[in-house]
Image: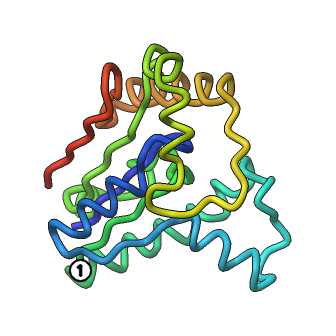
């Protein structure tokens, strides 16, 4: 089984992945770790500021990791904001039957009412060296993710009144 966790920055993808890792004992891959490994090893000319180009670049690698895990009947949790909303188009039915996907999305109300908490807990699992969280950008990204999740009929969790994210296999 492959579990994909997507969503905007600061939605708790890594926290959910950690909870699932502890519960199911699945291997875990952060796409951010893959990104930084490729950048720091000079295996790409892309930088951390090239988000628009990183989606395609990283997805070409991640989708093959997904296929390899499924073909070998191995379990893995993969989280990151570099999973395209149209991810289903890259797999035939055999693979799709072995993928569980969820996108974490914060509502406008949640972001507006809990912005200080979002900042407070931004490093709860991984330590962020630099935080440049922009509230307006966060609102925009989460609205877009909701629209795309609906458009592509993807599973999502809407974080609205309080942060309570649960996902079962």
Between 148 and 143, the residue placed more toward the observer is 143
Q: Residue at x 32, y 53 (%)?
A: 16
Q: Residues within 10 Å of mark 1 (few under 14, many from 20)?
A: few
In the rendered image, residue 86, in percent from the top left (x then y), is placed at: 47, 42
Between 97 and 31, the residue placed more toward the observer is 31
Between 85 and 31, the residue placed more toward the observer is 31
In the rendered image, residue 38, in percent from the top left (x then y), is placed at: 69, 78
Query: In the rendered view, would you say 135 is above or below 16?
Result: above
Quarter of the view holding residue 160: top left
In the rendered image, residue 130, in percent from the top left (x then y), is placed at: 72, 55
Q: Tell me: 168 left or right of 31.
A: left
Query: In the rendered view, would you say 74 is above or below 134?
Result: below
Between 120 and 159, the residue placed more toward the observer is 120
Q: Residue at x 30, y 72 (%)?
A: 76
* Residue on which disc 1 sits: 74
Please identify the quadrant where the N terminus is shown: bottom left
Q: Tell me: 152 left or right of 2.
A: right
Extreme-top residue of the structure: 109
Extreme-right residue of the structure: 45
Q: Tell me: 121 left or right of 9.
A: left
Task: Give the secondary structure at mark 1.
Answer: loop
Q: Residue at x 15, y 66 (%)?
A: 23
Query: In the rendered view, would you say 124 is above or below 61?
Result: above
Please identify the quadrant where the C terminus is shown: bottom left
């Amino acid at each position: 089984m492959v579990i994909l966790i997507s969503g905007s920055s600061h939605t708790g993808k890594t926290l959910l992945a950690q909870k699932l890792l502890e519960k199911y004992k699945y291997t875990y891959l952060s796409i951010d770790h893959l990104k930084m490994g490729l950048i720091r090893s000079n295996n790409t000319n892309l930088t951390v500021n090239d988000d628009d180009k990183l989606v395609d670049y990283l997805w070409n690698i991640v989708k093959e990791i997904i296929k390899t895990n499924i073909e070998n009947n191995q379990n893995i949790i993969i989280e990151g904001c570099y999973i395209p909303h149209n991810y289903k188009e890259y797999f035939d039915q055999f693979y799709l039957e072995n993928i569980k996907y969820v996108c974490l999305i914060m509502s406008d109300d949640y972001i507006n009412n809990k912005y200080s908490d979002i900042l407070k807990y931004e490093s709860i699992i991984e330590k962020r060296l630099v935080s440049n969280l922009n509230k307006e950008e966060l609102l925009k990204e989460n609205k877009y993710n909701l629209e795309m999740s609906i458009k592509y009929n993807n599973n999502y969790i809407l974080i609205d009144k309080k942060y309570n994210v649960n996902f079962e296999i």
